Image (tube, rainbow, N blue to C red):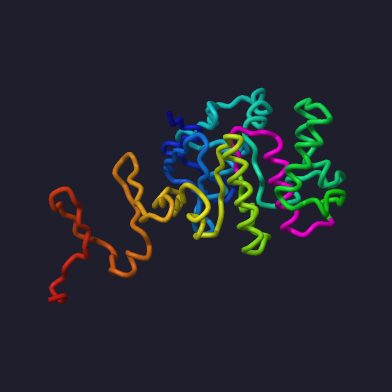
Amino acid sequence: MSQTVVACDGLVHIYRTAKIEAVALQGLDLAVERGEFVAIVGRSGSGKTTLLNILGGHDRPSAGYANVAGFDLATLPPGQREAYRRRVGHVLQTPLANLDRDLSVQENVELPLLARGIASSERRNTVGRFLEAFALGPVARARPSLLSGGEQQRTALAAALAAGPEVLLADEPTAEMDRDGARAALAQLSSLRTEFGTTVLMVTHDVDMHRVVDRVINIRDGRTSTERRGGREELVVLDRVGRLQLPEQLVHELGLVGRVRIRREGERIVIEREQKKSDG
């Protein structure tokens, strides 16, 4: 039986300063089932990182509902944040921000196992496995500051998964890798999350992610707009008040600007340009 482990309903987030107010999320709806691997894509400024910061427990939503692993993030008290972060891992966009710079790669991967009180023999086996999975053996004794950006990101993924989270949030975890390296890292991430039953929600600029993940969800203007599952056709997301965002490519190709006509044809709804007198 499927179970929703990440749920957002009408999620709103507003950034306020003394001089400006910016709406980053504008009624976003989202549901992710346990064990899914979901990619969130969208242009810069669409609200992707804001969404992950809320789901990671770093920011509170301004309005709406957000629940991850049974925790209501609008009302999460400070005393529960540590328990929440043990169940929900978050790989930040800046690779070094995820790592302890005074520890080696191997020690960074081992650190969450120490925190869980795992016996030394099991720690060695687990660390060795994650180092091998993410091709980190040759740099196991190096400090993070001496690594390439891609090696830092692979270390962050290995350490985050070693912590055994129920949900893993990852913000651009392969941005510093070349295409082959990114594909290899994501293949390992997919394999390991299947084995451990981890739910993965990943923000990325790579619109070709449908080859690797279960679903690709596009965010536009702070709302979920379209969705693709596997290699199948793109679906438009209809929110709870009946709003939808048409794919930008179709809007441009068909010249849909301003008012459009909408009509029903049996079980279908047809959207077309408003016919003006000059059109014919």
Q: Residue 220's x, y, as percent?
A: 44, 54
Q: Is residue 81 magenta?
A: no
* Figure quadrant of residue 121: top right
Q: Residue 217's x, y, as percent?
A: 45, 50
Left or right side of 123 for 86: left
Q: Nearer the viewer, residue 153 or 256?
A: 153
- How many numbered marks appear? 0
Left or right side of 262 for 208: right
Question: Which residue in the rendered view is the most extreme toward the top?
Answer: 79
**From what the image shows, is residue 100 above or below residue 115?**
below
Q: Residue at x 43, y 43 (%)?
A: 28
Q: Is residue 167 magenta?
A: yes
Q: Residue at x 50, y 56 (%)?
A: 211
Q: Nearer the viewer, residue 224 or 131?
A: 131
Q: Residue 236's x, y, as percent?
A: 34, 51
User: Quadrant where the N terminus lies?
Assistant: top left
Q: What secondary structure is the magenta-colored segment mainly?
A: helix
Q: Residue at x 52, y 49 (%)?
A: 21
Q: Residue 262's x, y, as percent?
A: 19, 56
Q: Range of the magenta residues?
A: 146-169
User: Quadrant where the C terminus lies?
Assistant: bottom left
Q: Residue at x 62, y 34 (%)?
A: 88
**From what the image shows, is residue 151 above or below residue 105?**
below
**From what the image shows, is residue 121 above or below residue 99?**
above
Left or right side of 17 for 226: left
